[in-house]
Amino acid sequence: GGPGPLTLFAPTNTAFEALNLPPDTSVDVVTNVLLYHVVSGQIDLAVGSIPYTALNGDELVVTVSELERTVNTANIGDTYPASNGVVYIIDAVLIPPTEPSTPPVSEPTSAPLSPAPTPEAGTPSPVTAGDTIEAIIQTI
């Protein structure tokens, strides 16, 4: 991992609730899922379908067109710059493939993402000194 730059695909709370993980899910499984949401380097969304390797070693595919912005099948919503990378809010928890030949799977939630808010002058950024990427990577 290291200090960055990093790209974090951060699922919404609704996406985590929809996942409904059993309480006895192992720490190794949870760690693998979390690392599947982080890519070394800052990904700037560009038109096309581009594979990236997540920190858990599995592949993610970011697709951008005039009609969609997705990572695997999760929709990409708001974007927040951070001091050590970028955070993209997504509407599903990304599940790593169970076998290398299996494509990554994610299940989008039914709640649509809201459009990115337009910050008003003087409004603090939702990502502050404890930037989300830094906080998550420090706990991994």
Image (cartoon, helix red, strand yellow):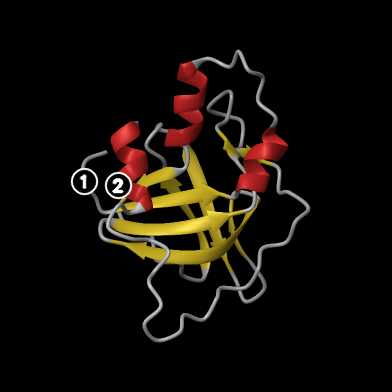
Image location (x, y in percent) of residue 15: 65, 44
Instruction: Give the crowd class for mark 1: few <14, some 14-19, many >=20 residues within 10 Å.
Output: few
Dot 1: what SS? loop
Q: Quadrant of residue 25?
A: top right
Picture residue at 67% right of the left edge, 46% below the top: 14
In the rendering, which numbered label is found on residue 3?
1
Q: Going by the image, does 40 lie left or right of 38? A: left
Q: Amino acid at mark 1?
A: Pro
Q: Quadrant of residue 135?
A: top left
> Which is nearer the eye, 137 or 54?
137
* Residue 61 is at least partly visible in this image: yes
The image shows residue 37, relative to residue 140, as above or below, that is: below
Picture residue at 59% right of the left edge, 24% below the top: 98
Picture residue at 43% right of the left edge, 64% below the top: 126
The numbered mark, 2 or 1, whose residue comes first in the sequence reads: 1
Q: Amino acid at mark 2?
A: Glu
Image location (x, y in percent) of residue 46: 46, 70
* Residue 42 is at least partly visible in this image: no
Are the two marked residues, 2 and 1, in contact with CB atoms closer than 8 angstroms? Answer: yes
Quick one: quadrant of the C terminus? top left
Residue furthest to the bottom: 121
Picture residue at 68% right of the left edge, 38% below the top: 17
Residue labelled with disc 2: 134
> Which is nearer the eye, 57 or 88?
88
The image shows residue 70, relative to residue 66, as above or below, that is: above
Image location (x, y in percent) of residue 83: 26, 60
Q: Nearer the viewer, mark 2 or mark 1?
A: 2
Q: Going by the image, does 119 lie left or right of 130? A: right
